Amino acid sequence: MSGRLQNKVAIITGASSGIGRTTALAYAREGAIIVCSDIRQEARGEKPESSNLTTMQELQNLGAKSIFVKCDTSSAQEVEELVKKAVEEYGRVDVMVNNAGIAIEATDPRPVWDYPEENWDKTMAVNLKGVFLGCKYASRQMKSQEPHPNGDRGWIINLSSVLGLGGTPASAGYVSSKHGVMGLTKTVAWDCAEHRIHVNAICPGCTDTRTSMTKAAFDVSEVKSQLERQHPFRGLGEAEDIAKAAVFLASEECSWITGIGLPVDGGYSSM
């Protein structure tokens, strides 16, 4: 029985850990061919019950076609080479998941008057420039390739955040970068629409991946309890919750959807 993403070639940045890792495995279970990308293959700070296997090893156990391509998403040359490698290996790129991101504020929150310029620059380089580069080189490839039977040429999915829809204290860089991802998503959706390329964003709430982005906050019980109360439906999310949305947005089920930011947040954004 074919999966919803059968034989679609999907690049996933930040695929070694957290949401990226879980999305790669979910895509593989739906029949996709996976191009994993990260700065290294080893997982970073996963939950204690998580597998010790790398994403690539997990994909191999699933019998999925997959390769790993090392890539710093803040580098135009490396992102361009990532897309080229996918095309060289598999002939096309159907799905681009711009997932790689950082949250310096998770361990070093600062009010704006004390916010280091280097933290701003680093955050923008990864969280916003990296998404821009992924959109740029993926869309360039997608618009030139043969469409699917339904006429669509590609699906781009950007990881924003509920903090790309609202604000929070002491997080100027992260919040600004994720708002930028939303603006970029809407603009790229217009650019790509005539080429039948879907461009959407996912806006996760607080997700308990225990990567470096979340571990520091979730290890403090008072902070974790407060965050759980801000997500009225079931408390904190899991990476699988985000991966399910990523499967939907890469499938033909979203045939008339582009330019949106989909909150997957247990009700957080309804406040």
Image: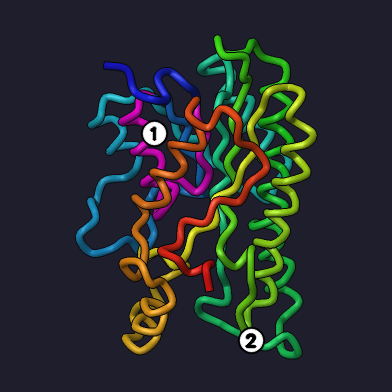
Q: Is residue 86 magenta?
A: no
How far, Cα to Cα, is label 1 from label 2?
A: 37 Å
Write the residue at 58% across / 24% down. 93
Residue 35 or 171: which is nearer the viewer?
Answer: 171
Decide: is 217 above or below 32.
below
- Residue closest to the far left: 49
Counting from the top left corner in percent of width and height, residue 198 is at 63, 32
> What's the colour scheme?
rainbow
Where residue 46 appears, as percent x and y from the top left, is: 32, 60
Sequence-wise first label, 1 or 2 = 1
Residue 28 magenta-highlighted: yes
Q: Name the residue under label 2.
A: 110
| Residue range (magenta) | 10-31
Q: Position of residue 16 (x, y in %)?
A: 41, 48
Label 2 sits on a secondary structure element that is loop
In this view of the protein, which residue sits in the foreground, 105 or 152?
152
Residue at the image position 72 percent from the left and 73 percent from the top = 118
User: Of the numbered discs in the image, which one, if any, rests on residue 27?
Assistant: 1
Where residue 167 sits: x, y (%)?
A: 64, 75
